[in-house]
Image (cartoon, rainbow, N blue to C red):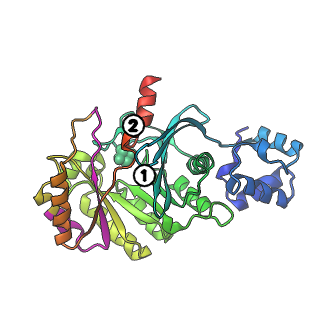
Amino acid sequence: MEKTDIKSLDYEELQQFMASLGEKPFRAKQLYEWMHEKLAADLDEMTNLSKGLRKKLKETTDYTSLEVVERLVSGIDGTEKYLFRLSDGNVIESVLMRYHHGNSVCISSQVGCRMGCRFCASTLGGLTRNLKPSEMLDQIYRIQQVSGERVSNIVVMGTGEPLDNYDNLLKFIRLLTDEHGLNISQRNITVSTCGIVENIRRLANEKLQITLAISLHASNQEKRKELMPIAYKYDIHEVLDATRYYFGQTGRRITFEYSLVGGVNDTEEDARELSALVGDINCHVNLIPVNPIKERSYVQSNHAVIEAFKNKLEKNRINVTIRREMGRDINGACGQLRKSYMDEN
Ligand code: SF4
């Protein structure tokens, strides 16, 4: 019989599950508290559950608890990178970033990724599998436990395309924002997508207050195709229309992520085209100096080019920031810690 992944169950589902084991409703409440509020790493920590019940749970359930394989702490800004092992032996990475406004964790949503963005190390081995809601949650739970610090902001921007794992993502968000769990505000959650149009619209219809970030990375369809294979499926204008729809349904300002790649998408003409593309959208553009990876020949735009690009957007009344590089000394780029671990093993 397949074991139940109890950390992925919402409270109602957990009540039903406990009833199926012949347990009283208050046991579901205790168990939920241990998992999502006290962040227990193990069933044996749950000391107010009888030994008999814990034994029953061990026999019937899978208790997701990620194992920390590596934790790197930046000497520059305190950023922490975590490499976690899942119960099936796969590894994933997550990042804790410390800002003035609070601690932010960037999580992975899949093991690997099948989207093939040309500048990204996470996709080099393709997609292995989706992460379960419990595996997304536990990245945050473990980091909060290990660092001993409260996490207030979550970005789903690590390895994986979250909208390619839609149902698990939604369940994860519901559990994360539950008042009986970590109770993170929807407004403090950002989900980043390379632009899966039908799921952006589906997400808009959920009318959540989360921030939608679009990996745009190009100022026109042709250039986007060179950098992101997903552009062959969805035209850039379809993606932008979906973001207009998202804003219409939720009132949430859109974030556009734009990785500046030296000589590829960083010219003045690109800045002009980009301004025209997103000028009518209530948005914010986040410029990201691309992180070079050795498997690709892309290079970072130089400092003056980045500043000029930003100025051009500002002149066109676009809200824009340059993303501060965090944890530069600990193998910064997304997916690289996991990749070097896998190469070695
Ligand atoms: S940038 Fe995101 S969507 Fe694109 S390949 Fe990397 S992980 Fe996947």
Let me know if residue 119 is in the magenta part: no
Q: Is residue 234 left or right of residue 96?
A: left
Residue in view at x 46 percent, y 48 percent: 78
Residue tagged 2: 336
Residue segment shown in magenta: 272-295
Residue tagged 1: 157
Q: Percent position (x, y) of residue 330?
A: 41, 39
Say which quarter of the image contains residue 63.
top right
Residue in view at x 21 percent, y 66 percent: 277
255 versus 58 height, above or below: below
Say which quarter of the image contains residue 182.
bottom right
What amino acid is found at the position of numbered circle 2 in the picture?
Gln
Let me know if residue 276 is in the magenta part: yes
Q: Is residue 83 left or right of residue 316?
A: right
What amino acid is found at the position of numbered circle 1 in the picture?
Met
Q: Percent position (x, y) of residue 311?
A: 17, 65
Q: Secondary structure at mark 1?
A: loop
The single residue placed furthest to the left in the displayed view is 269
Residue in view at x 71 percent, y 48 percent: 40
Q: Tags 2 and 1 in contact by the CB under 8 Å rule? A: no
Q: Percent position (x, y) of residue 69?
A: 55, 33
Residue in view at x 41 percent, y 33 percent: 339
The single residue placed furthest to the top in the displayed view is 345
